[in-house]
Image (cartoon, rainbow, N blue to C red):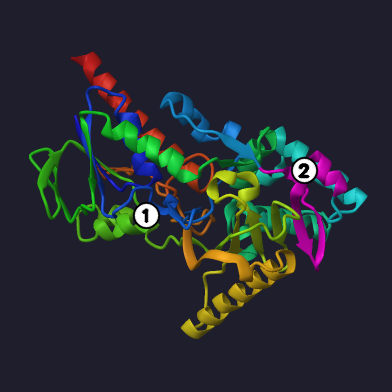
Amino acid sequence: MKIAIIGGGLAGLTAAAYLTENPHVEGTLFERSPQLGGRAFTYEKNGFTLNYGAHTIYGIDRHTLSSMEHELRLTFSSKQVDKRKVVYSKHNHLTTAPIDAINLLRTDLLSTMQKVRFVGEITAIIANIHNLKNYNTLGEYLEASNADDDVKELWEHLVCSNFFIAPEDARHVSGAVISEYYHNLFLSSKPVNYVLGSWSVITNQLKEKITSSEHWEIAMQESVEELQFEDQKFILQTKNRRQAFDKVIFAMPVQHVIKFLKGTAWEPFLAPYESNTATEVMIYDVGLSRIVARPFTYISDMDNKIFISDVSATDHTLVPEGGQLLQGIAYLKDHYDSEEQRKAYLDDKNTQMEALFDQHYPGWREVTAVKRVSKKAMVSSVKNVTTNTLLPTRIDHVPFYFCGDGCEGKGELAERAFSSARSVALSIVNEIQEALQTV
């Protein structure tokens, strides 16, 4: 069986790596860019390793990446963020972030009675009996809840932090989605981790697995321009070739899939996903020639909905000796009355971010060796709110497979890319096994 995969991000690489395990499959992975990884792309500058976007792994011991580590024989190390040095800032007051039982006892965000209430909520989620899962959205649950405003604000802020969305969007996340997500996270013994060496450690191994197979090819900087169906085969046309395949996997943002299939017989079946909006954030990376301060590993500004991670405090491999790498991320709204309002809003977020750097990392401007600011970076191609619809890995009457962070799968952000790709690949392998058994 010959398979084409369009897209060389985390999902495309994962699907191809799993399919190389089957001797009855051969294929080509097409990537239009000069590098693999998509939005998980990693690059080095002046001795600093930078990622396009957040690369934190939440609950790695219960994460799809851990399944991949064993199934694909990946080799990587991870290190947990120091939970005792994770803080929240509210009204310019710093306090311990309530991310586990010890921190919850220490935090000033909640009163004693509120802490008892929140422990009860966590316990109910772990036991999978929390009433939140029965509500259409977090907003509806909070409206019906008799909890104090501080507890409601904490729930909202937690969802902002883990889903990388603005507060108004947090209230539109499904109660069932939140309940399942935190059920996994609260049961994890490793809630917040970095893969040492960042995304490239994973993408390079997936690439090596694919290229070492004599049945697979990675076609770099080769964009698929046209797709036709002839004689029970899918014909893909690029600038360099015209090639026939038995199956096609789209491993690219949903918006790109819809654009690619526009005007084809399959376009009407993708209509429910056409209005999906992406999760976008501002990312502000600074590599410092020396450590200016290390008061904490992570600070979340609850007032302005921005946070800064001292990435190098957890992963020293990302910086030259004596250096420091900070990554700031701001959650963004996506509705503006005008282009001028959008620019003013983003400029304001940039100012807030730099003010947070100034407050907690004095002197950072003078020792900045590397700086990269992306005012609108796509973290996920589909924001997981009830007004959007995640793309299924298969759609009735459409002969293709779909995977990526905008598709149905386990977890959020990168995990959804991994899990949907793994699901697609294993589904194809099962089809092949069933076909062989009937012969």
Residue 181 as seen in the image, left or right of residue 109: left
Residue 26 as seen in the image, left or right of residue 383: left
**Secondary structure at numbered mark 1:** helix
In the rendered view, tell whether residue 117 sits above or below residue 213.
Answer: below
**Magenta run includes residue 85:** yes
Dividing the picture into quarters, in which one does residue 430 lie? Answer: top left
Residue drawn at 72 percent across, 58 percent down: 293
The image quadrant where one finds the N terminus is: top left
State the image coordinates of residue 55 (x, y, percent, origin top left). 53, 49
* Residue at the spot of label 1: 254
Dividing the picture into quarters, in which one does residue 234 lie? Answer: top left
Residue occupying the far right of the picture = 112
* Residue at the spot of label 2: 121
The image quadrant where one finds the C terminus is: top left
**Separation of disc 1 and disc 2 at Cα?**
35 Å
**Secondary structure at numbered mark 2:** helix
Q: Which residues are magenta?
A: 81-106
In the rendered view, tell whether residue 213 sits above or below residue 193.
Answer: above
State the image coordinates of residue 17 (x, y, percent, origin top left). 34, 33
Which amino acid lies under the numbered mark 1 shown in the image of this protein? Answer: Val
